[in-house]
Image: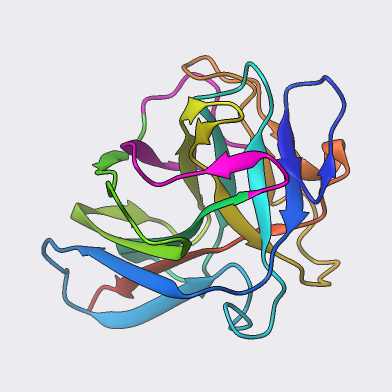
């Protein structure tokens, strides 16, 4: 289970805890870009990072290696060529979130509103860890090459691994609050470290938070 803001029951899922803003480090992994009209899909609708109180999404015991995913949609066909997410590097309430270890970011495209259980990802990137990173917020920006094609009637899912050892050395993500009744169950927890996953909405665990994830791409010319 996750751990975010409140500690969840023993159901596999995440949880979150409020954290105060800290110095931020920006890490960029460059590749190539497709040409076209730029598109930005922001899971917090332009409010992050300045206007939201960040919360840590933390795996519970036995959940190291599980994934958190967010669903995106766009009203036109697009190539996805970049993903950005934020992760905490700190120790709060005995939960040590680090960015030392590598983590996997998977992209899936499909027509279902839930991430796929067994489908191979349409793109998969191993994001290198950052040994000796300063405490604070780390923003990871990853270019996707080759870019991933998403039709206007399809969804894109960005799935981020939460690796490590709970609670002493684990990869966490940051989430924020946004009151938006249009986006119910757009965040998910995998309940497994490998396929087949058993995805469940974060709201199932009482976590009404948005992962701090952005997607960039282009509408083809």
Q: Is residue 144 left or right of residue 111?
A: left
Q: Could you say where residue 32 lies in the image, as x and y percent from the top left?
A: 11, 64
Residue 138 in sight here:
yes
Report the front residue among 185 and 213.
Answer: 213
Q: Is residue 173 magenta?
A: no
Q: Is residue 13 left or right of residue 87?
A: right
Which segment did they paint magenta?
A: 92-120
> At x 63% / y 82%, what residue is drawn?
47
- Above or below, 144 relative to 165: below
Q: Quadrant of the C terminus?
A: bottom left
> At x 86% / y 67%, what residue is drawn?
181
Residue 112 in sight here:
no
- Above or below, 144 relative to 128: below
- Above or below, 214 relative to 131: below
Report the front residue among 218 and 11.
Answer: 11
Q: Could you say where residue 206 lies in the image, as x and y percent from the top left?
A: 88, 43
Q: Quadrant of residue 113?
A: top right
> At x 63% / y 16%, what residue is drawn?
62
Q: Quadrant of residue 31?
A: bottom left
> At x 62% / y 78%, what residue is drawn?
45
Q: Could you say where residue 161 lies in the image, as x and y percent from the top left?
A: 46, 36
């Amino acid at each position: 289970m996750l751990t975010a803001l409140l500690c969840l029951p023993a159901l596999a899922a995440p949880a979150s805890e409020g954290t105060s803003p800290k110095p931020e480090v920006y890490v960029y992994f460059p590749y190539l870009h497709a040409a076209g009209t730029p598109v930005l899909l922001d899971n917090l609708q332009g409010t992050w990072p300045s206007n939201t109180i960040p919360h840590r999404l933390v795996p519970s015991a036995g959940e190291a290696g599980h994934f958190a995913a967010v669903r995106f949609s766009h009203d036109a066909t697009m190539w996805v060529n970049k993903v950005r997410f934020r992760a905490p590097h700190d120790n709060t309430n005995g939960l040590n979130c680090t960015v030392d270890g590598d983590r996997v970011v998977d992209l899936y495209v499909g027509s279902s509103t839930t991430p796929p259980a067994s489908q191979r990802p349409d793109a998969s990137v191993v994001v290198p860890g950052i040994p000796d990173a300063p405490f604070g917020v780390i923003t990871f920006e990853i270019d996707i090459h080759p870019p991933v094609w998403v039709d206007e009637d399809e969804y894109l899912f960005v799935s981020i691994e939460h690796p490590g050892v709970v609670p002493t050395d684990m990869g966490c993500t940051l989430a924020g609050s946004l009151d938006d009744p249009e986006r119910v169950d757009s965040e998910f927890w995998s309940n497994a470290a490998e396929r087949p996953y058993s995805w469940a909405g974060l709201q199932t665990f009482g976590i009404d938070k948005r992962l701090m994830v952005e997607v960039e791409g282009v509408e083809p010319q």
